[in-house]
Image: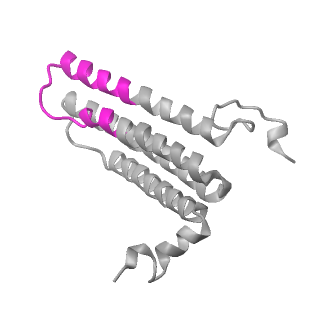
């Protein structure tokens, strides 16, 4: 039984006819919005609580924009140049591992930052554990990206990276 014939949950990431480039563009745009909203939220939440010390809320903006938005745009360009998505397993590992890992990491930055601002600086081990899972997801996703990249390179270029006679190993 194919459940997808019976259960239809629409998400922009799972639409079968959407190209990998479009998925990456939507993903980059989503991280841009999260980053911009994270910056506004950090400023307004700390201002509303008269909080002037450093908080993890301050890095939500930069993490979302640098890791989520800019790195996804770079991957979009790599997809355009090398068609990384032809290596479905590695590309899916990157896409889902990285994005879900970053989402968990950002969510825990927000939770921890709000706790700091509201006077609860002691972090529960649960929050640290979930943040750790987010970092593991990020790592797995980045490994998937590198596997997809290296297997997408033309054979000639791959050989130059791995032999003793390529440009990286000149004597």
Tally the numbered discs: 0
Q: Vertically, is 51 above or below 108?
A: above
Q: Vertically, is 164 above or below 66?
A: below
- Residue 70 in percent (x, y) is at 41, 39
**At 65% across and 58% down in the image, what residue appears?**
87
Does 86 sit left or right of 140 as displayed? right
Q: Does the segment drawn in magenta span residue 57?
A: yes
- Which image quarter: residue 65? top left
Highlighted range, magenta? 35-63
- Residue 59 in percent (x, y) is at 27, 37
Please identify the dominant SS of the magenta region: helix
Q: Does the segment drawn in magenta span residue 102?
A: no
- Between residue 60 and residue 69, name the one nearer to us: 69
Specify the quadrant that holds the C terminus.
Answer: bottom left
Q: Vertically, is 75 above or below 162?
A: above
- Residue 21 in percent (x, y) is at 61, 39
């Amino acid at each position: 039984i194919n459940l997808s014939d019976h259960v239809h949950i629409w998400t922009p990431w799972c639409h079968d006819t959407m190209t990998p480039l479009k998925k990456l563009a939507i993903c980059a745009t989503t991280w841009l919005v999260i980053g911009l909203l994270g910056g506004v939220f950090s400023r307004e939440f700390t201002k509303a609580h008269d909080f002037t010390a450093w908080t993890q809320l301050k890095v939500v903006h930069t993490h979302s924009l640098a890791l989520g938005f800019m790195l996804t745009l770079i991957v979009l360009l790599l997809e355009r140049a090398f068609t990384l998505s032809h290596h479905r397993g590695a590309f899916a590992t990157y896409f889902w591992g990285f994005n879900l890992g970053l989402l968990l990491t950002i969510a825990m930055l927000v939770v921890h930052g709000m706790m700091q601002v509201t006077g609860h600086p002691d972090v529960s081990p649960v929050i640290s554990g979930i943040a750790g899972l987010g970092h593991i997801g990020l790592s797995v996703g980045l490994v998937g990206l590198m596997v997809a990249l290296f297997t997408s390179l033309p054979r000639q270029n791959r050989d130059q990276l791995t032999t003793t006679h390529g440009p990286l190993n000149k004597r």
